[in-house]
Amino acid sequence: MKQTSKGKIEVSLEPGVAIVTIDNPHRRNALARQMRLQLHSTLDKLLGDEPECRAVVITGAGEHFCAGADISEMTKRTITQSREILEESAQTIRSMSAGPKPVVAAVEGIAFGMGLSLVSAADYVVASRTSRFCAAFLRVGLLPDSGLLWTLPRKVGPAKARELLSLADEIDAAEAFRIGLVERIAEPGQALGEALESARQLAQNPPLGTALIKSALTYGSHTLDDSLRTEIDYQPVLRATEDHRQAANAFLEKRKPRFSGQ
């Protein structure tokens, strides 16, 4: 993609997996508005109509994942412009949280502010042992945004989320793993490699089943009745798929299934 003075979003593809890199290392991968727009359009395509992509890995260039939004732009915005920008970020989080394909975050260095929002919206997180996390919004007098008010409590529980959002303290990878924000710890410099390993495994799952699980967890599981209704609505659809028949036959024939998304 075309490079700008405010950084860029890079994409590389390998069989079944797309790697999306936030590339603004001289600003610790802070996201300027143009980069946010690029990130949204990139994820929208990869999580939607890109048939060669079955899972996405998000990472940062250089030593860090993402320092959050570019603070240098914030004081120049009107209220209307701020609302527009927040809606753009909201679309990214919607795509990650409820989109049909799994998203894995590979974290080195810091994941602060919107960087933490991206981590919290991912389905699976691999973090370097030396990485650090912070809901830094309150440090600059702001409300947590980019979905963090919803995604973080669902990851770590309401009480811990309240603590992290209200104190804006940094936590290390060990603590992030302990509270459920991170699923896997890697040695420094190895987060991307281990995230790719996880993404390849996720990419082998039935695509429609994966999509409906993500949709159900995001939109259909707030109460017991919601969850039961979602099961009744979604399960018959999956029972009618070729992937379900393939898996059932593979089980009976004692072989590994081959999922096509049909």
Image: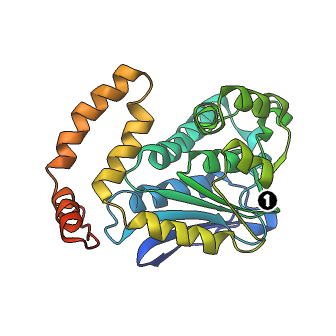
The image position of residue 37, as x and y in percent, is 54, 53
| Residue 211: image location, x then y, percent | 35, 50
- Indicate the position of residue 239 as horizontal and vertical percent values: 17, 48
Considering depth in this image, is 53 or 35 the residue closer to the camera? 53
Residue 49 as seen in the image, left or right of residue 2: left
Quadrant in which the C terminus appears: bottom left
Question: With 55 as the anchor, is 187 left or right in this view?
Answer: right
Image vertical order of residue 182 relative to residue 63, above or below: above
Residue at x 25%, y 39% (from the top left corner): 234
Q: Which residue is mark 1?
A: 131
Q: Point out residue 8 in the picture as x, y percentages from the top left corner.
A: 62, 66
Q: Is residue 69 visible?
A: no
The picture quadrant where one finds residue 163 is: top right
Left or right, 171 with reference to 252: right
Closer to the camera, 130 or 178? Answer: 178
Q: In this picture, is 133 found above or below 233?
A: below
Mark 1: amino acid: Ser
Which of the pair 220/74 is nearer the observer?
220
